[in-house]
Amino acid sequence: MSDRLPGFSTLAVHAGAQPDPTTGARATPIYQTTSFVFNDADHAASLFGLQAFGNIYTRIGNPTNAVLEERVAALEGGTAALAVASGHAAQVVVLQQLMQPGDEFIAARKLYGGSINQFTHAFKSFGWNVVWADPDDVASFERAVTPRTKAIFIESIANPAGSITDIEAISTVARKAGVPLIVDNTLASPYLIRPIDHGADIVVHSLTKFLGGHGNSLGGIIVDAGTFDWSTGGKYPMLSEPRPEYHGIRLQETFGNFAFAIACRVLGLRDLGPALSPFNAFMILTGIETLPLRMQKQCDNAKAIAEFLAGHPAVASVSYAGLASDKYNQLARKYAPKGAGAVFTFSLKGGYDAGVNLVSKLQLFSHLANVGDTRSLVIHPASTTHSQLDDAAKVKSGAGPDVVRLSIGIEDKEDLIADLEQALGA
Amino acid sequence: MNHDAYPDNYIRGILNSVKSIAMVGASPVNVRPSYFAFKYLAQRGYDMIPVNPGHVGKELLGKPFIASLSDIGRPIDMIDIFRNSSHIMPVVEEALTLDPLPKVIWMQLGARDDLAAAKAESVGIKVVMNRCPKIEYGRLSSEISWMGVNSRTLSSKRAPAPTQGMRLSLNRMSVGGGDTAASDRAAKNKTEQS
Ligand SMILES: Cc1ncc(COP(=O)(O)O)c(C=O)c1O
C-alpha cells in the first residue's frame, strides 16, 4: 500500500465511495430508508451509545449521506463532515454546538443576505448575539472580541459581489481570541479555496450551489478541520463536558479530532432534525464528481464576461476579483489562483430601472434566486435576496439599488456575451 | 519514528500483525472511551486482556481484570495504555521488564510521553502515541465512514458487509497517510506549547 496523496479530481470521484458490499453496485445506491435493523439487542445498545460504527435512523445518519460527508471532508482536507438539509441548517447546527444564550459571535458584514437575516433575527430569538465586523478591515474583528465571543464567521468568497476575504488574517484574530473560525466556502468550493489550509477550524457549505452544481437539490454540510482544542476552560461544554444525552460521554475525549462533527450529528442533527434526504445526497454526489470541470469552466466564462462588461458603455462598474483592476485582485491571486469564482456583480449607469430592464430582456440568463447552477443566472439583489436589509446595509453588503448579480454557468461564453449584449444594447 | 504524523503503513502493519492486546486502564464503565475501544477490538477478533488493579475480581465483557502487566503470565503482542500522559512512564518501565517484550506500545488519544517512547523504541518496540486503535482500525477498514469521518483511504474493490466478530481488510489505498495535514499541525502546535 502506498501513502500518496491523490489529486483533487480523483478525490472528487472516489472519496467516500466504494462498490456496494451487498450488490456490487458501483454508483452509490440511494438508501431510501428511514431505519436500519439491529443484529441483536447488544448491537442496538452499542449503536445508541455511540460505541459501534453503524446505522440507526436516517435523522442521525444514512449510508448515502455518509458517502457525501466523507467526500466533502476529503475535498476540504477535514477530519469529518455532517450533511444536513440546507446551508442554513448547517449554520444553525454549527452555532448550536458553540453558543449558549447570551453568547456572541462575530460575523463579516459581507455575507449572503439570508445569512445576515438568519443571524440578525432568528438567532437573536435563541439569545445568540451577532456582532458585525468589516472583512476589509481585519482590526474590526479584533475590536469586536469580548469574553462572550464564541466564534468568528466569514465567507471565503462573499455573496453577492464575489469579494475575497483574507482568511489567514482573520484566522490569526480567531486564534488569539481562542475561538474557532467558521468559513462559509459555498461560493469558492474546495476546488478554488480550501479554507482549512488557511486556518479555518470549521467549514460550512450550501451544497445547493456549486457542489451540487445543477440547481436541482438543496443541501448543506459542516466540515470539521480537527484543529480546534475544545477542552480548554469549559468554554464549549457541548464538547468538553459529560453529555447527559449520552450517559456522561465527553465528546472531545472520545472522538478526538473529529469530535465537533460528531457533536453536530448527535447533539445537533439528532435533536434539531434537519436531515438531508438520501435522494438529494445522491444528486449532490453525482454533481461533485464533475466539480473540478464545471468550476474551472464557470470561472473562465465569468472572467471573459466580466471583461466584456467592464468595456461596455452602459456599465458603470464591475466587481469581479478576477479582473486585474479589481480591489480584491491581490487576494484573489493569493487565495484562488485557479479563478475568482463565478458569482459577481456589476452596476448599470441607468441605475435601478436599467437593472430591471436588463433582467427582463435576457434570454439565456434565468432570473432566479440561486447561484452555482450549470445555467447562467441573474438577479437584482436589492429587490430580492437582500431586500430585508435597509438601504445603508444593502450598500455595505455590496447589494446597492443599481447592482445586478450574475452567476455564470457552463454554457459557451460567446452565447452568454451575445445575450448580455442584446439586453444591454437596446 | 516521527510521532507527529504516522504513515498509514506503520499503523496498518501493527493492526494487521498483533493478536493479543493488554489494555492498561481499561474501565468497566460503559461510557468510558477505554470500554468502547476494548469492546470494539474484541469484536474485531483481538485477544483482549483488561489490566486495572482497581477492578481485580471483576470481568470486562467476560475477561477477568488483571492487576498488572507482570501478572498476565503469558506473552502479549501489544500494550494499549489508557492513562494520562503523566502516568505513562511507569507502565512503559514495567512493560520493559516483561519477557518476551511486547512488540508494540500504544498510547491513547491525548496521551503522549516522548521519553517513554524513546525508551521503548531503543529496545525495538514500536510505539504509537495520541491515537485510538478503534478509530484507526475503523479508519483503515473504512468502517468509520458510516459516521462521515474522512478515512483517507480509497478502494474500488467490493468489500463484504461487516458482521459481528469479523476481521476487516485494512489494505486499502491510503490518501496521504496519517492524519489530515491541518489536524497534524494543530496537534504539533499543542504539544510544543505544553
Ligand atoms: C454563501 C451562502 N451561504 C449559505 C446559503 C444558504 O444555503 P441554503 O439555501 O442551502 O440554505 C447561501 C444560499 O444562497 C449562500 O449563497
Image (cartoon, rainbow, N blue to C red):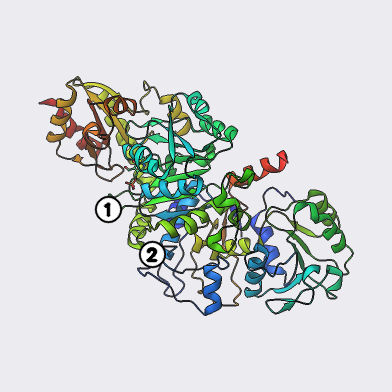
First in sequence: mark 2 or mark 1?
2
Q: Residue at x 12, y 34 (%)?
A: A361
Above or below, A322 relative to A31: above
Amino acid at the residue labelled 1? Asn
Residue A29 coordinates in the image, percent (x, y): 38, 67
Quarter of the rendered image showing ligand 1: top left
Quick check: do tags 2 and 1 share a chain? yes
Q: Are marks 2 and 1 in contact (CB under 8 Å)?
A: no
Q: Quadrant of the N terminus of chain A?
A: bottom right
**Closer to the eye: label 2 or 1:** 1
Q: Looking at the picture, tell me which residue is in the foreground, A380 or B8.
A: A380
Residue A283 coordinates in the image, percent (x, y): 33, 57
Amino acid at the residue labelled 2? Ala
Q: Mark 2 falls within which chain?
A: A
**Disc number for residue A216:** 1
Q: Looking at the picture, tell me which residue is in the foreground, A15 or B49.
A: B49
Tag 2 secondary structure: loop
Where is mark 2, residue-wise?
A: A27
Q: Looking at the picture, tell me which residue is in the foreground, A314 or A298.
A: A314
- Can residue B101 be seen in the rendering of this structure? yes
Q: Looking at the picture, tell me which residue is in the foreground, A25 or A142.
A: A142
**Disc number for residue B160:** none
Q: Quadrant of the C terminus of chain A?
A: top left
Q: Mark 1 falls within which chain?
A: A
Check the image and name the residue furthest to the left. Answer: A426
Residue A313 coordinates in the image, percent (x, y): 19, 19
- Can residue B162 be seen in the rendering of this structure? no
